[in-house]
């Protein structure tokens, strides 16, 4: 055995480890895709999308309501900011409802289901009593609160159907009754048809379509079989065709699909055509905020049902695509909340709210684009109308509460440290505080100077 010069046996050679293969550094589009994917998978993504998206839609809606309603207010001999101030008041009240709903526990939401349903049905019955109900644009779905304030109870019927239907289906799922078709349909479908009947007595088919969409969304989430789902859809389609055929106004709206210029006769398509004119004249970046031409009496309901057309004229394609992206993000976040929860009530309620907001946005924007008949429904969180804004913001508060209630989201929120009012040491004024970053850097600099480094 060979030895070294010192007489000791040589140390055994350690085999060199193979060099770790470095993964190629991702750059460009692929790196952005992976970062975006990691961001989408974070626990609080749905929470931020719901809160931020709804806030941006509401603020942009206030700006557009102020811009689109000035001419209408002046034509009515009112101050130019009249409609904006009313919408701002509704937004402030709605913000309080949103905050309250986002802080309520799930059991309290379930407890409110029956009172909200009973209150909505009672108000919808009052609408049909002569002297109490008020007719607006041919639809008697309003109750006067005195002065210029009115309330539309059918808007609260959407929230009532979501909460009550979610609680009903959740209790039946806990008892394993949803496997039987009669328990899936009764009493959900009869109660929904009761609300639809009260709405259709007043002639508001647009709101009836939204309630029908919510009903189908709840049945879909409950796992209704295809035959049952198709049967309910067929009945609703037949009833809808009968209601359209028996109304000259609804037939006229149906005939205006794809119209590009006003016609002479009983079907003039004035509103639909001027909505297209407003979108077409906007271009890429629009004519500028407040510079719309169509709102000067040419476009009816510029600040309510057709506010998206004024948005396209003043903010252009960039503005309309931004609104669409915000609604798409809101819909994605709602679907994510409904898909990741294990609570059946949360799944049904989140799915119902998402169906409500998404369907109403699609119907409103589709009517402005000339792809769907004009249904007379507002753009959620965006159009003028306090009766539509208040229940919608409460529903957004529901989604925020459900997004915060996810286990991963609760853990992420619990790990956060408060930005203000951090706890100090228990020794009172003489206790040691945690060193600030600049103190740490100064201490490192002093150590470096003492060791002879420059």
Image (cartoon, rainbow, N blue to C red):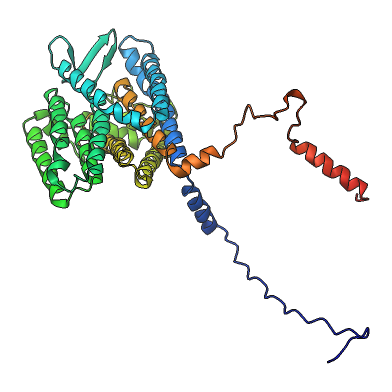
In this rendering, position of residue 10 left or right of residue 87: right
Rendering coords of residue 446 (x, y %): 88, 42
Residue depicted at 17% across the width and 17% down the height? 127
Answer with the quarter of the image where residue 187 lies. top left
Residue depicted at 35% across the width and 13% down the height? 74
Q: Which part of the image, by quadrant, shows the N terminus?
A: bottom right
Rendering coords of residue 39 (x, y %): 50, 48
Rendering coords of residue 145 (x, y %): 26, 10
In this rendering, position of residue 132 left or right of residue 78: left
Residue depicted at 13% across the width and 38% down the height? 186
Rendering coords of residue 359 (x, y %): 27, 38
Residue 126 against residue 44 in the figure, above or below: above
Front residue of 40/433: it is 433
Answer with the quarter of the image where residue 288 lies. top left
Residue furthest top in the image: 147
Front residue of 123/404: it is 404
Q: Is residue 266 something one can see in this rendering?
A: no
Q: Is residue 149 something one can see in this rendering?
A: yes
Answer with the quarter of the image where residue 277 lies. top left
How many marks can you see?
0
Front residue of 439/379: it is 439
């Amino acid at each position: 055995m060979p030895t070294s010069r010192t007489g000791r046996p040589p140390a055994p050679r350690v085999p060199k480890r193979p060099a770790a293969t470095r993964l190629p550094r991702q750059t460009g589009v692929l790196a952005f895709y992976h970062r975006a994917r990691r961001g989408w998978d974070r626990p609080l993504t749905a929470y931020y999308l719901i809160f931020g998206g709804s806030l941006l839609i509401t603020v942009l809606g206030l700006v557009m309501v102020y811009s689109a309603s000035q001419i209408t207010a002046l034509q009515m001999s009112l101050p130019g900011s009249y409609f904006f101030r009313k919408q701002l008041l509704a937004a402030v009240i709605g913000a309080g409802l949103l905050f309250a709903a986002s802080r309520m526990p799930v059991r309290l939401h379930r407890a409110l289901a029956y009172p909200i349903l009973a209150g909505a049905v009672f108000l919808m019955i009052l609408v049909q009593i002569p002297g109490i109900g008020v007719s607006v644009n041919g639809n008697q779905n309003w109750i006067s609160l005195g002065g210029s304030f009115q309330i539309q109870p059918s808007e609260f019927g959407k929230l009532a159907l979501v909460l009550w239907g979610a609680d009903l289906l959740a209790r039946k799922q806990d008892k394993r009754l949803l496997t039987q078709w009669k328990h899936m349909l009764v009493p959900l479908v009869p109660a929904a048809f009761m609300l639809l009947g009260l709405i259709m007595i007043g002639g508001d088919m647009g709101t009836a379509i939204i309630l029908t969409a919510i009903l189908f969304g709840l049945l879909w989430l409950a796992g209704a079989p295809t035959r049952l789902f198709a049967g309910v859809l067929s009945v609703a389609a037949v009833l809808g065709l009968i209601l359209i055929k028996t109304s000259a106004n609804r037939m006229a709206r149906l005939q205006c699909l794809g119209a590009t210029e006003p016609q002479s006769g009983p079907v003039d398509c004035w509103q639909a055509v001027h909505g297209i004119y407003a979108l077409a004249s906007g271009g890429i970046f629009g004519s500028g905020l407040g510079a719309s031409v169509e709102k000067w009496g040419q476009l009816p309901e510029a600040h309510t049902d057709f506010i998206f057309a004024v948005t396209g004229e003043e903010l252009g394609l960039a503005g309309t695509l931004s609104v669409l992206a915000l609604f798409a993000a809101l819909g994605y976040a709602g679907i994510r909340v409904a898909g990741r929860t294990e609570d059946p009530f949360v799944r049904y309620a989140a799915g119902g709210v998402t169906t409500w907001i998404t369907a109403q946005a699609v119907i409103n924007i589709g009517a402005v684009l000339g792809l769907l008949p004009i249904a007379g429904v507002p753009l959620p969180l965006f159009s003028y109308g306090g009766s539509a804004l208040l229940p919608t913001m409460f529903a957004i508060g529901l989604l925020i509460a459900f997004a915060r209630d996810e286990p991963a989201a609760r853990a992420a929120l619990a790990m956060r440290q408060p930005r203000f009012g951090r706890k100090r040491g228990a020794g009172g004024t003489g206790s040691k505080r945690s060193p600030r970053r600049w103190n740490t850097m100064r201490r490192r600099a002093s150590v470096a100077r003492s060791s002879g480094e420059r």
